Image: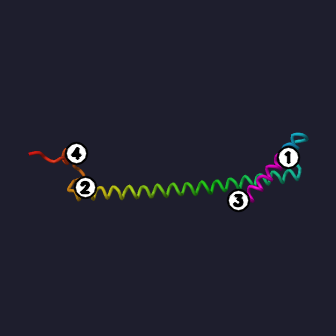
Amino acid sequence: MKLVKTKSLEVWSKLICHTNTTNQHTHTMDKPNSKVAQDLTTLMETTMQQLSHKFQATSDQIVSRMEDMGTRINDLEKNVADLMRQAGMDECQTGEEMAPKRQ
């Protein structure tokens, strides 16, 4: 990563020098300036690939956590239903039906 940062600083420095030179003289690109453009293009492509990989990894992690949460919710629903059955409650009963009857 340090190599990429060093390389990017070098490319940006060249780009700034190129921009200053271009603004002072002419807007044509000769071979050395073409190298700067190629370096900048390569740097940007690398950066975009890194961002894409990080985005994909984060996206995969979010999907995985959502699936895990869905599994946990399903398990919780099953446990609640089991507890209700053990307590003698029917899942269809309403609040009135669950209240004890007075004699």
Q: For the point 60% across and 54% down, which residue is it? A: 55
Of the residues shown, which amino acid type is indicated by label 4?
Gly
Dot 1: within a 10 Å radius of its alpha carbon, few (fewer than 14), some, or many (20 or more) residues? some
From the viewer's side, name the closer residue of 68 and 45: 68
Of the residues shown, which amino acid type is indicated by label 3?
Met
Q: For the point 20% across and 48% down, which residue is it? A: 98
Q: Is residue 46 left or right of residue 24?
A: left
Nearer the camera: disc 3 or disc 1: 3
Mark 4–mark 1 Cα distance, whole angstroms, equals: 78 Å
From the viewer's side, name the closer residue of 27 and 63: 63
Nearer the camera: disc 1 or disc 2: 2
Give the residue at mark 1: 18
Question: Mark 1 or mark 2, which has the lower sequence index?
Answer: 1
Mark 1–mark 2 Cα distance, whole angstroms, equals: 75 Å
Q: Quadrant of the C terminus?
A: top left
Which of the labelled discs sits on residue 1, or is there none? 3
Which of the labelled discs sits on residue 103, or is there none? none
Farthest residue to the top: give it. Answer: 24
Farthest residue to the right: give it. Answer: 25
Of the residues shown, which amino acid type is indicated by label 1?
His
